[in-house]
Amino acid sequence: MSDAASKIVAAIERISRAYRFMIMGRAKRYGITLLQAQILIFLSDSPGERRRIRDLSQELGISQPAVSDSVNALVKKGLVVKGAIETDRRSSMLSLTQRGEELAKDLKQWHLKAVEALESVVSREEKEKILEILLKYIASLYERGAIKVTRTCLTCRYLSVKRSSIGRDYYCKLLNLKLGIEGLRLDCPEHMPRRSQKHTRTRAS
């Protein structure tokens, strides 16, 4: 293991802690926990078909009982409502109330600050390279079972990658579209994993 690789992982963890700190600071204003804040942000950003308890559990990497307790607390606070699902009576579809939407919007202000911090020190070419590297890292973590759910281009069976004189060319076979690095998606609704997301195999590093 190289010293540079260890430092990169440590740097990513430090950035993650900074993000959690920013979210937590805003969450405290409203008397909610970090997990409850993450749930509000997730519901604000996610389509209806991925708004069930089990979806939240998978996406956030938190047990279903813990997520269920937090959702019930948000319902009591008037921030979330549960709706029936005709095809699955045992589950509920979660939605934000108007107050929940407003709170989620305020919570997401940390994202703008994080983007501004990056924009102030990184060129466009550097941002594209960082994005490509991080997507490759996410794909590697997914292959090792460290990430259970991913809908990125680099883990999708529709992506074709070819080497060129200037790097890699990415092509989406589903959309018949050549993708620039900025066109690579982190959360694609058409994503089709190359293999089951329920895998547990760990590949030797």
Image (cartoon, helix red, strand yellow):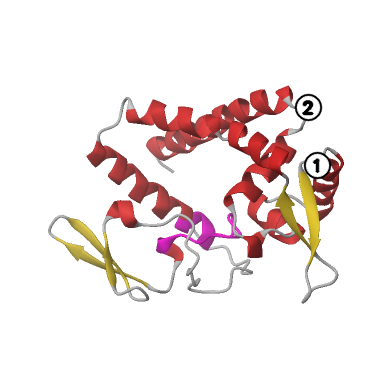
Q: Residue furthest front?
A: 98
Q: Which residues are magenta?
A: 139-154
Percent from the top left, x then y, of residue 175?
34, 73
Q: Quadrant of residue 110?
A: top right
Q: Is residue 89 magenta?
A: no
> In the rendered structure, are the residues bearing label 1 and label 2 in contact, judged by CB atoms less than 8 Å apart?
no
Which part of the image, by quadrant, shows the N terminus? Answer: top left
- Crowding at dot 1, Cα within 10 Å, few <14 / some 14-19 / many 20+, comes out as many
In the image, residue 57 sits, relative to residue 76, either above or below, namely below
Residue depicted at x 74% and y 27%: 30
Circle 2: residue type = Gly
Q: Is residue 153 magenta?
A: yes
Residue depicted at x 65% and y 25%: 26
In the rendered structure, the answer to whether residue 121 lies left or right of residue 84 reads left
Residue designated by label 2 = 31
Q: Residue furthest left?
A: 165
In the image, residue 120 sits, relative to residue 40, either above or below, namely above
- Crowding at dot 2, Cα within 10 Å, few <14 / some 14-19 / many 20+, comes out as few
Percent from the top left, x then y, of residue 143?
51, 62
Percent from the top left, x then y, of residue 165?
12, 59
Residue designated by label 1 = 74
In the rendered structure, the answer to whether residue 57 lies left or right of residue 145 reads right
